[in-house]
Amino acid sequence: MSLMRQRRGVLTALPAYAAATAELPRTAAPADGVQGAVAVVPGSGDWWQGLLAARSGGAVAVVITDPGTLPWEALEARPWPGGIPVIVERPRLRSDVVADAVRARRGSPARIVIVECAAPAASLEGVIRDGFGWARSLGQGPLTLQAGSATTQGRIALLSSAGTAGAPVPTTLAATAAAAGPHGGGLLQVLALGEVRTEITVDQPAGLMRLETSTEEGILRAPERYESSARLALRRALAACSSGEPVADLDELLEDISLAAALLRS
Amino acid sequence: MPWSVGILGAGPGVAALHLPVLGGLRDLFHIRHIADGGSGRARELAGRLGARWSAGEADLLADTGVDVVAVCSPPAEHARQILAAVAAGKRAVFCEKPLATSPEEAEAVIAACRAAGTVLLVGTNHLFDAAWGRVRHHLMALEGRIQAISVTLALPPNDRYHGLVAEGGPFQAARRGRPGVEDPAVAAEVLRQLLTGLAVHDLPAVRDMAPGIDEVVYARIAPPIGYLVGYRSGGVLVQLALTMLPEGPDALWRMTVATSHDRVEVNFPPAFVHAGSASTRVRSVDGQWTEYRRDPDDGYVAEWRLLASLLEGVAPVEYDELLADACYALELGYGAAAKVLEGVSP
């Protein structure tokens, strides 16, 4: 098989994905059309329509980049018909860092998970959603909302995740609307407390993603992930096309969106 | 001339905390008398120091050489022993937290101290931490732009730290096993005691920023033993979390304050040790993090130094603040316990 025939086409107008394609020269190549290609759908605007259009156009996989919020009702009314892998690029919830965090706990369950978010009001819901993603991952199961309260600038909530072996993991959220700084994005801090402690700090204005795992022996700081978030997402999409293994990204995103919407409606 | 201290209580807090701290403040205090509740530990502790010892409180209170009574007994004894110290004409009372176990007790204690002119200080050591003092100054200048406060504690067993500041343990009381918190009534009482006995370290500082308790949003016991409590104070949301672990990393004792334009994080050192003040970080909305230096003195040393200042008349005793702090913790304890009994369903 020639090299060209091994490479999968990538349809994108986004510079980050054009660069990511160039960084995967053995497995990816720019494509002119959606048929048979991995389609990159920008997460701004109505990305759901973009997702459906890519699928109906013959895409073999879709990458949704850093999806913004959509009304949950809109998503509920248009169930995903499935059939092709959908990879969701969530820069605050990188799959490799999540895997690092879970692996570093070596099976030690979290006793409590604490999520704190601060972001300009327009982007707060997205930060909350990704905070729920972290809590779901560290709490080892889906979250349910138990109680909450809001002020004009803040919100707190108590949730519970399924946990393992029938031991639910209580989870709290505190989210506040901060003034908009010169750079976009917000701050997300997650603590999983227990015999092993995990602390994640994602500070987009600072360009910071830090994962620390603490045990009685000391603190292990995970090495920085230098692969771009776009390349990681694209590589996962290409791998999903090759392996045929199911990808849970979209279901997990919808679960987190649903929970964030329920919180903000409560 | 140092002030003479008589200590009511001979438990871990005395052996591993107050005796070593006072040993480092010999220009200000000396230990004259230690009394236990009948355990015999006072004799051992006092013997090393050449101090008097007794069982029960009567002999210590009758000791005319004692200027300052340090109440380090179980919480249920505190108010009664303070009143007894005032009646005995002592100059000052240092009371380990909590001040009292009911608002009525707290009011009686404050009224008696105020009437007699007895100096009173409650050992909420974080309140006296120099780093917190600077943070408070920063936050008060924001004029109401505080949005949320979180106080998060993840604590390994205390005996890990006892051995770093004292000898002759074990100091840890025998573990009594996990209380039967599956019973809501037991869970409510355990939660109330944890809030008034442990969260109370930070509640006076929280009260400075969130002065009322308008609504307890949720309250529950967390495994293996701990709590999760959320409440609203006007426009400020407060979350308190604790887990006490059988093993694990060093203590996390963190207060975070979110304001409209920055985020302040105060990390207190573990209990008992003398690692200086809390460390403080401030994160601004543009993603700039600023970390401030620690002071060499911790809150334990600072609280005893303050007591000396109060005795010398350099600073006034804030009776009203002490009463308000005590009632705040008690109100939160009752409110959280009631929330447990009603369940967390909104």
Image (cartoon, rainbow, N blue to C red):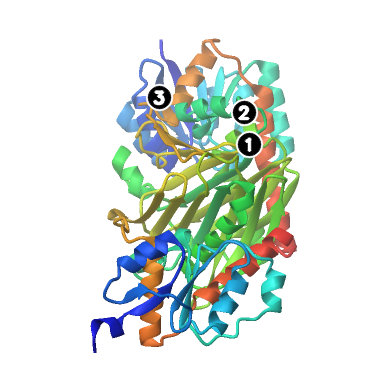
Q: CA distance from mark 1 to mark 3?
A: 43 Å
Query: How many numbered discs sit on the rendered protein?
Result: 3
Is B332 displayed left or right of A245 in the figure?
Answer: right
Measured as percent of width and height from the top left, residue A67 is found at: 55, 64
- Disc number placed over residue B95 in the picture, else none: none
Q: Which residue is mark 3?
A: B31
Kindly indicate the quadrant of the structure image that contains residue A197: bottom left
Q: Which residue is mark 1?
A: B146
Dot 3: element: strand
Q: Can you identify the residue that label 2 sits on? A: B142
Estimate the x, y position of residue B74 in percent, counting from the top left: 55, 43
Query: Seen from this angle, which residue lies furthest bottom?
Result: A1
Q: Look at the numbered disc 2 and give the secondary structure of its residue.
A: loop
Chain ID, mark 3: B
Q: At x 51% / y 60%, what residue is drawn? A: A113
CA separation in Å, label 1 and label 2: 7 Å
Q: Are marks 1 and 3 on the same chain?
A: yes
**Chain designation of label 2:** B
